Image (tube, grey):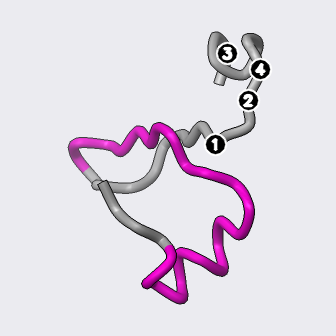
Amino acid sequence: MVDIAFDDALFSRYGVTIPVLALHSSETHSLLSELGWPFDARSWQHG
């Protein structure tokens, strides 16, 4: 868990959204997909 309030780069990136889940590639460690709050059922199921 990361508190974005104390990280200027993360705070700028997320603003008022709340990152809930993030999927990273195990090979390249790059971000594949992210789900932020608020989200609906469609976003949860289909990313």
Quickly name the residue at label 2: 39
Asked if disc 2 and disc 4 are in contact, CB closer than 8 Å, the reply is yes
User: For numbered disc 4, what is the local secondary structure?
Assistant: loop
Whole-percent x and y of residue 20? 51, 40
Q: Is residue 7 magenta?
A: yes
The amino acid on which the numbered mark 2 sits, given as a three-letter code, is: Phe
Q: Quadrant of the C terminus?
A: top right
Question: Which disc, if any, is residue 40?
Answer: 4
- Front label number (2 vs 3): 2
Q: Are marks 2 and 1 in contact (CB under 8 Å)?
A: yes
Q: Residue 39: x and y, percent?
A: 73, 29
Disc 1 + disc 4, Cβ < 8 Å: no
In the rendered structure, which segment of residues is drawn in magenta? 5-27
Residue at the spot of label 3? 46
Mark 3 surroundings: few (<14), some (14-19) or many (≥20) residues within 10 A: few
Nearer to the camera, 29 or 6: 6
The x and y percentages for residue 18 are 61, 51
Q: Residues within 10 Å of mark 4 (few under 14, many from 20)?
A: few
Number of numbered labels in the structure image: 4
